[in-house]
Amino acid sequence: MLKLPILFLLLLCLSSFTSGEIKKLKIRSDNRPMILFERFGFTHTGQVSISVSSVSVISSLATSDPSGLGFFLLSEESLIQVLIELQQNPNFCVLQSNYIQHLFTFRELSPPPNSSFDRAYPVTSPNEYSLFFANCAPESKVSMDVRTELYNLDGRVKDYLSAGLTQLPTLYFLFSLVYFGFLAVWVLVCLKNRISVHRIHGLMALLVVMKALNLLFAAEDKHYVKVTGTAHGWDVLFYIFQSMRVVLLFTVIVLIGTGWSFLKPFLQDREKKVLMIVIPLQVLANVASVVIGETGPFIKDWVTWNQVFLIVDIVCCCAIIFPIVWSIRSLRETSKTDGKAARNLAKLTLFRQFYIVVIGYLYFTRIVVFALRTIAAYKYQWVADSAEEIVSLAFYVVMFYMFRPVERNEYFVLDDEEEEAAALALQDEEFEL
């Protein structure tokens, strides 16, 4: 009965999360056979510090063997070997494996009533390790207060970010500067073409502000974690602006997809319903993101929150596509009756290109980035974050360029000489989705 949850937890090590920081948590009456605390990339100067206090073990049996409860490190390379051992022997205790790096067992605790343990361990072999607690004592419930510090030493300075993430503060700060510059350019474009500015362009400017501030506070958050092991409150600002940015991004994509403000001053009922679905779901996704980011796999519902975030994100990504498809179909139907073929052809081309751009952006940031995080060596985890930010910036630039406030842009092509050619083009099945 214990083998399945152990296998599932070990396979969870293959997911893309990597933590750092100084963790403090309370475990109360927990009977899980294994608890995954965090995963961290160590250099040759890595250190693991574990402090355990207020330890108590309640067993329905007469006694429990303290050597069957303890902490250990497991590398990704050794994971397969441990899985094989568990498959071959369902009653196998992972603490007996030769493929793990033992830290300590409850046999080394100070005597009760003040059962505690505090020690630091050097990591001599650079690699990415997962920190586990194993409970091989049958029918036992464990309660304890745990404090963990995982870090690498840079000289005498502690670096609490994983070896593959230590570049993130600089990366996020540089991209925040790029977005502030992008905002300045967008404001100049809007001022230069005031006659063609619509309400959607104001929302787009606000989106860039949220993105720039989100990256700035992400840089501060990671910097303080890197230096001190705690975020010092910057994580609160990071989550606030991340939530606002994500909700605003999906809202802007939906509004652009409907043609709101530049093609029509109102939203149809079905378009309002999409917003009413997307915005609350994004709020739920952000709540799940905060729970995932601020806790860890050691809480019992951590996997559930990951599933909630994944499902909600997929639903939102699908929902924002519908308004673009509706606009393309509406423009195609309108082109058959209003006699403005060239103008409708330009609009159809623009919305079709926007449809492709949105699909490409969602595919890359949801699938390709996840694949990069999964397959990249632990020292190069920052590459996935760089790729995500580069593609996001490209998406913003293309979207803003396509729907910029220009007096004579693709929306207003009215050249009579092109009407006949445009009418023929509109009959082509190319514009069917």
Image (cartoon, rainbow, N blue to C red):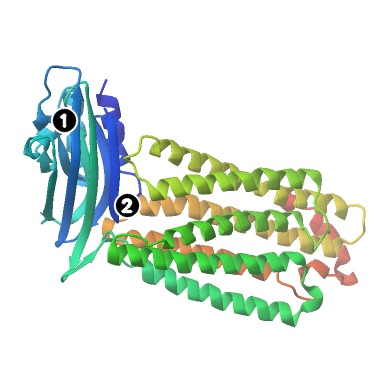
- CA gap, disc 2 to disc 1? 26 Å
The label shown at residue 18 is 2
Quarter occupied by residue 87:
top left
Number of the front mark, 2 or 1: 2
Q: Amino acid at mark 2?
A: Thr
Q: Is residue 402 left or right of residue 11?
A: right
Residue nearest the viewer, comparing 21 with 407? 21
Q: Position of residue 317 (x, y in %)?
A: 59, 47
- Element under disc 2: loop
| Quadrant of the drawing holding the N terminus | top left
First in sequence: mark 2 or mark 1? Answer: 2
Q: Residue at (74%, 52%) from the top-left corner?
A: 431
Q: Residue at (9%, 32%) from the top-left corner?
A: 67
Q: Position of residue 261 (x, y in %)?
A: 79, 62
Q: Is residue 39 visible?
A: yes
Residue nearest the viewer, comparing 405 with 156? 156
The label shown at residue 85 is 1
Q: Is residue 404 left or right of residue 336?
A: left
Give the class, few, some or many, for how many residues have Cα within 10 Å of label 1's Cα (few <14, many ≥20): some
Q: Amino acid at mark 1?
A: Glu
Q: Residue at (27%, 44%) from the top-left corner?
A: 37
Residue nearest the viewer, comparing 335 with 287? 287
